[in-house]
Image: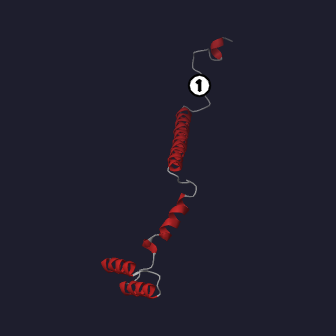
Amino acid sequence: MAIDDFGAPGGETHNPLIPPVYDLLWTLVAVGGIVTLLGVVAVIVLVVHRSRRMAARGQDPLTLQEDLAYRAMQSAAFAPAVSREHRLAELDDLHRRGLITDDERRDARAEALRA
């Protein structure tokens, strides 16, 4: 029995019981795993980078969605529309009760009429 019967170093080391297409399959699995790993690393790097930028602006990345929803609900965009007549009547009432001065009433009426 010679050493070549068992496969000499540098000779073919392929197992004859495993089809050659499996080499291609395992190569594709390895490449896919590496690509997936690189993708995960890229996502982690982007999340950390974005979180740091938000923190530098004074925003909390973990509560940003709630903060934006709160600001939107407090904005005039979601406020009920008040008719011009209602606003003018409200200004007259405030003036009659002495809560605003003549100048404030005049300025507020001019602004309400412009809107």
Instruction: Name the residue type under label 1.
Output: His
Residue furthest to the top? 2
Asked whether, in this view, residue 110 is left or right of residue 41, the answer is: left
Asked whether, in this view, residue 81 is left or right of residue 58, the answer is: left
Depicted 50 relative to depicted 17: above or below: below
Depicted 77 relative to depicted 63: above or below: below
Q: What's the residue at 53%, 62% (across, down)?
A: 67
Q: Position of residue 58 (x, y in %)?
A: 52, 52
Asked whether, in this view, residue 62 is left or right of residue 92, the answer is: right
Q: Position of residue 6 (x, y in %)?
A: 65, 17
Q: What's the residue at 38%, 85% (across, down)?
A: 88
Q: Position of residue 51 (x, y in %)?
A: 53, 48
Q: How is the image coloured?
A: secondary structure
Q: Position of residue 16 (x, y in %)?
A: 60, 27
- Dot 1: within a 10 Å radius of its alpha carbon, few (fewer than 14), some, or many (20 or more) residues? few
Q: Nearer the viewer, residue 28 or 69?
A: 69
Residue located beneath label 1 in the image: 14
